[in-house]
Amino acid sequence: MPTAEILSQGDEVVTGQTVDTNAAWLAERLTDLGFTVIRHTTVGDVLTDIRDIIRDAAARADLVIGTGGLGPTEDDLTARAVAEAFDRPLVLDEQALAHIEALYTRFGRRMPAVNRKQAWLPTGCQRLDNDWGTAPGFAVEEQGALLAFVAGVPREMRNLYEQRILPLLRARFDLAPGRLVTLRTTGVGESDLQERIGAFEEPEVVLGFRSILPENHVKLRFDAGTPKARVHAIVDDLAERIGSALFAIEGLDTPGGSLAQVVARALADRGETLAVAESCTGGRVAAACTAIPGASTWFVEGLVTYANEAKVRLLGVRPETLAEHGAVSPEVCAQMARGVREHAGTTYGLGITGIAGPSGGSEQKPVGTVHVGLATPSTVHHRKLRLPGDRERIQTLSTAAALDLLRRSLQNLL
Amino acid sequence: MPTAEILSQGDEVVTGQTVDTNAAWLAERLTDLGFTVIRHTTVGDVLTDIRDIIRDAAARADLVIGTGGLGPTEDDLTARAVAEAFDRPLVLDEQALAHIEALYTRFGRRMPAVNRKQAWLPTGCQRLDNDWGTAPGFAVEEQGALLAFVAGVPREMRNLYEQRILPLLRARFDLAPGRLVTLRTTGVGESDLQERIGAFEEPEVVLGFRSILPENHVKLRFDAGTPKARVHAIVDDLAERIGSALFAIEGLDTPGGSLAQVVARALADRGETLAVAESCTGGRVAAACTAIPGASTWFVEGLVTYANEAKVRLLGVRPETLAEHGAVSPEVCAQMARGVREHAGTTYGLGITGIAGPSGGSEQKPVGTVHVGLATPSTVHHRKLRLPGDRERIQTLSTAAALDLLRRSLQNLL
């Protein structure tokens, strides 16, 4: 298998002001593609260091991908470092310049003079046009290695990798990627998941786990050439062991996606609609729904009723219920779900109320106590949760729990 | 200033299955302490690679901290790599063994045989007792550098750094930490920011830029011993050059914080309240507000009125205004802001309506057209935006623009 190295550049990364998520993102994709990733290196804005690292990496690996250091400012040194490392003096790339100017024009602004610097690229490089930001990337072949350099802003980097670098890799390397299948679950911890799966010994598969709050993933890396029927049989077996916590499978012919995407697809397919009443999640459920393109066909409204008065006025929660049971109770949760469904005239209504902390907890209702409710045309489903962690974690887990309750209803699992 | 390098070891890190948060955590602390962190390197479980990297790092830096590779299994290779790099054969450390055994005893279990391996440490090293897990760390002096190796589990690593490594560093190095000041801005691009600042040449400060959507930061690292009056004079000068896009200063005696935190503090101080009516941001403004502990004292409610019917029913937007100007218009935006303020009885009302895409745009109102409005006790402020990028970016920038309009009002900048 060809080898790959990843370079991350920037004072903000080497001093720890920014956690470098680019390296892990790239490493995962390169591994999936069939590369052996042998090293990541992070270095600050020091010309000689960058130059030496680029040269060393080219000597060791078949592929080097560098991120960062392509901005307009004086401390963006990657192009100069490549120029010095391989004796490829910087030259003004007129097309790159036109591309940057066009980007500014499109937004009705004039290109600041400093941005001209970004159009100076190493002699003889291949330009990687950046349609997502001002910094063009570029690629060179040196010492038998392909080296590609792109912007460090994650959104730009991801687009440049997928749209510009990936085609180069497919053309240049003889890659034999295995098949990667991801089983996405929520509401079940990693060790529980491991116990459910139990003994797993299939010679053509490597099984791994990965936690991305609020999900736990089971990753299956099948050897290249594993027959499709065999892949399906193994995945089906695992899906059965995992049970209803499994909400999406990616890497087969299935659509996959996040919890909100799975819910969105089901609602759109059925021509059904949703309204949401949130207290402790404070708009996160609505935000997760409306992050999905086309949400307006099924998402009607979201009410963030933080104050009790708003729960009464907007949702029809009864003051006596609030007085008797408190805002964080199954009763108020159910009234919120029913109220928002009725007021908005939707198929479903979700209600979430709880204590995200850090204050507001009591002995009977400690921080992390959360109720999620789902009103359907025929009934109200309710779940009480006791969630661990800080405010951020409790809000994230509550949001997932609410969407998962709806997902289970849509999949007839309740 | 002494230099430092950080090594992270493990197949799960180099293949991107785990994002390496240890390196950033250590780098930040070492930088604050007065080290110049010059490089992080991540490598998989390959003995020769680890050995070479350790040797190279010791030759370059004054301090090397390595994490990971100290577990009980065969692919945990750090101690062997150090032994080979510096010709310090592994020897059984009886005290380390007793420490591991005691840890198991404490939890009522017998130590598995494989864990004996963890007590074999390089000859002549200084043991770093691990009270938070089974893997003891160790430190050696080689080539004029101090090298310390600790477990990679973040919780263990952090404790080992603070309780074991930090005392060594204070004893061994003459540290003079500088002062880091961050100026946080929003609504202004990095190159615009640079142009506003213009020529900046102060010998005792290093100036850098950092983009974290939707913010751009100016970072100032002052040499140790720079008089406080001088720090303030330079920061004041820069603040004036940047102008009203500056919303928080961190690292001085100022409280700093995110845009939502700045707004939250101002509202809480004044005893004022907020309600929000969102269309294209879909709950993100409410979520940003309610992410802040104690938001219930000033955040009353958020309405995500995606459908026109909801805008009419919940906010009192006039159907004829919708028909005449469309939902994405200054008129509807103003009615949303006024409507939510009046219905909720708050000091301020924010209204956001726009086209986040990918579909829904037209020639007159392309994707990225967004209106934000702020209703105050006396008037309605309005901003029309033309935002670049995809749905995610447009939603993020719109959310910041809405909060920034409120921030400017609270700071009397409108």
Image (tube, coloured by chain):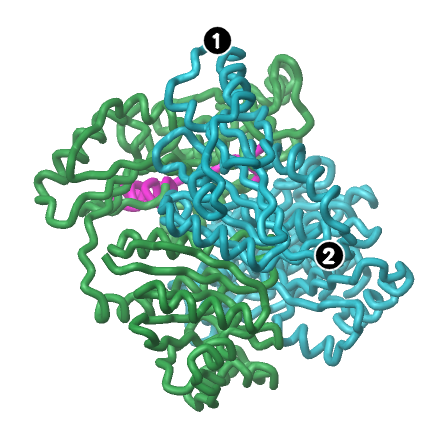
Chain colours: A green, B cyan
Q: Could you tell me the amino acid type at mark 1?
A: Gly
Q: Is residue B98 visible?
A: yes
Q: Residue at x 46, y 34 (%)?
A: B90
Left or right of residue B234, residue B220 in this image = left
Q: Quadrant of residue A145?
A: bottom left
- From mark 1 to mark 2, how far is it between C-alphas? 56 Å
Q: Is residue B341 magenta?
A: no
Q: Nearer the viewer, residue B109 or A170?
A: B109
Rendered position, B40 above or below A200: below
Q: Is residue B262 visible?
A: no
**Image quadrant in which the C terminus of chain B is located:** bottom right
Q: Could you tell me the amino acid type at mark 2?
A: Arg
Q: Residue at x 26, y 45 (%)?
A: A250
Left or right of residue A386, residue A322 in this image = right
The magenta segment is A259-282
Residue that carries the numbered disc 1 in the rendered image: B108
